[in-house]
Every structure is written in structure tokens, then in C-alpha cells.
Amino acid sequence: MGQARILVVDDEPFNLEIIAEYLADCDYSLVFAKSGEEALAQLEAGSFDLVVLDRMMPGADGIEVLRAMKASAPLRDIPVVMQTAAATPGQVREGLVAGALYYLTKPFEPESLLAIVRAALCDRSRRLELAGRIADHGAAMRLVERAEFSVQTLDEAGALALTAALVCDNPEPVAIGLAELLVNGIEHGNLGIDFVEKGRLKEQGAWKREVARRLALVENREKRVWLALWRQGTCRHFRVRDEGAGFDWRRFLELDPERAFAPNGRGIVLARSLAFTGLEYSGSGNEVHAWVDQAVDYIL
């Protein structure tokens, strides 16, 4: 992806100036809107990679803008960072339900803004890359009845997710979901990078370096994450298993409002809500089953 184009929406000119200052040294193209109505007009008129959206505005507020975006096919996939002083769990949950997966509490530090913007743009870039690569692959995977694979690195996880998803009629969201599960198996399962540590590494821009460092350690060199897939009638069943001790997966099936402000912790939620008809962990959490029912129109 080239220079990212970001729409910044806030009814307070001072807040727009602050965000412009915080992002001045980044290679982003910023467009500003002072109301929800102006934001929707800008979105309809141009192409954007991210929206930094104020929640509390006169007229059409941030929630209304977000709901309008999610109701529009051309706009629904644009990630939204909701910036707000309304940060009670109930208010955050309302935003999450409306489709905001990234949050900033006013007032925020420059580092917090940069970390959450980078995370949102990285997620979008990965989705666009997967979509493009899917178009380049053949349909031979549709003939697969049963297969098993193993990966060790992040690059291998991305490539395998793309290939395995081709057994489905709508492979793009499935590729995103499988990539999240495989990466989770590598970083959390096999390498022991937990939620808090990953958040710190993401903010420092050091996550990939740390994954590579741990993969090179003697105790991790033979560890793999396994993906099995098979056909069951109209369903495509996937099983991902890592060699770790597991984790408290129940905490990550929904995006808790307390984690909405972190740059990470959305992978399982995205996989569960956007990629699969169903998703279930078993045992300690080092094995997860996901399936796609081709007869169900489930993609949002």
C-alpha cells in the first residue's frame, strides 16, 4: 500500500490541529472534517484507508457516522479509530457493536495515537494484500477433501492461510481468520508472547523482530503450528493446533471494552465474527476448531 489516506473527524478545530501535529512526521495524507455530515460527504467523494472519528459531535455523531459506514458496501471495510472522552464500558461496548474495533481516550499521548493508527492500517494492508493474492491463485484447492499442513514463521502462516482458504466459496474473510489463528498459535502458543507483552512490542514497533528472535532460540526451532482441513457436507472444517501450554481463550472471544484501547487483541474476535460460521476452542486453548458452512450467508 502507498501513502495512507486518513480522514480525521472532530468538531473542535484544536483537536484537529493536535492530531495533525502528532501525525506530522508520518507518511500519511490527512483530510479533515468538522462534522459527521461533512465526514460522510468526504467518504462518499474520496477513497480512504482509515477514519479517526470523534464520537461526541453535534448533528450526526460518531456512532451515526460509523453505522452509516457499515451500512455502505464501499465504506464498511474502512477501519475506524474512535476517539472519545466517553469511555465507560457501556459506551465503548456501543461503539464496538457499531463496528469500531480501535479506540483512543481523550486526551491521548502521541505514542498512543501512532500505535493505534499503525495497528489499524497494518490490519487493512494485510486484508488488501490477501485479497490481491487470492485473485492470483487457481481454483484447484476447491477439490481438496482433506489436508494437513504445518508452519513455523509469520510469513508461512500468511501463505498457508491464503492457500487453505481457497477451499471456500468466499476465501478472502476465511484467509484473514485463518491467518489470525495461525499467528496466534505461533506468537502466543509456541513463543509465549502474551497480550500485554505484544501490546508493548507493537507500540515499540518491535513485534516482528521479537518473534524472529524467539523463533531462532534452540528451544523453539522445532516447534510448529498445525492446520488440518476437511470437507463435511456443505461445511469446510479447520483445526489449528500449536505446541504451547494454552491460554485463557474465553477472555478473547469478545472484545472486552477494557482491551478496546490496545493496538492488539482483536484477532480471535475478527476470526469469529467475520471469517467463520462457528469457532470453538478445546482443552487448554492450544487447539481451535473453525468451520464455514457454504450454505449459510454469514459474511457481514
Image: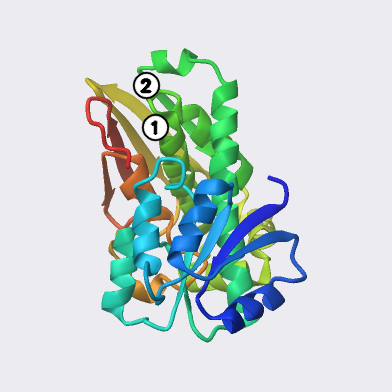
Observer-nearest residue: 150 or 145?
145
Q: Tell me where residue 111 sits by quadrant.
A: bottom right
Position above or below: 234 against 268: above
Residue type at numbered disc 1:
Ala
User: Which quarter of the image is occupied by the C terminus?
Assistant: top left
Per the image, label 2 sits on a secondary structure element best described as strand
Per the image, label 1 sits on a secondary structure element best described as strand
Mark 1–mark 2 CB contact (< 8 Å): yes
Left or right of 154, for residue 196: left
Which label was assigned to residue 146?
A: 2
Q: Residues within 10 Å of mark 1 (few under 14, many from 20)?
A: some
Q: Tell me where residue 200 sits by quadrant.
A: bottom right
User: Which quarter of the image is occupied by the N terminus?
Assistant: top right
Which label was assigned to residue 228?
A: 1
- Residue 296 screen position, x and y as percent: 22, 30
Q: Residue furthest bottom?
A: 107
- Residue 84 screen position, x and y as percent: 44, 78
Residue type at numbered disc 2:
Arg
- Residue 238 screen position, x and y as percent: 35, 35
- Residue 40 screen position, x and y as percent: 46, 56
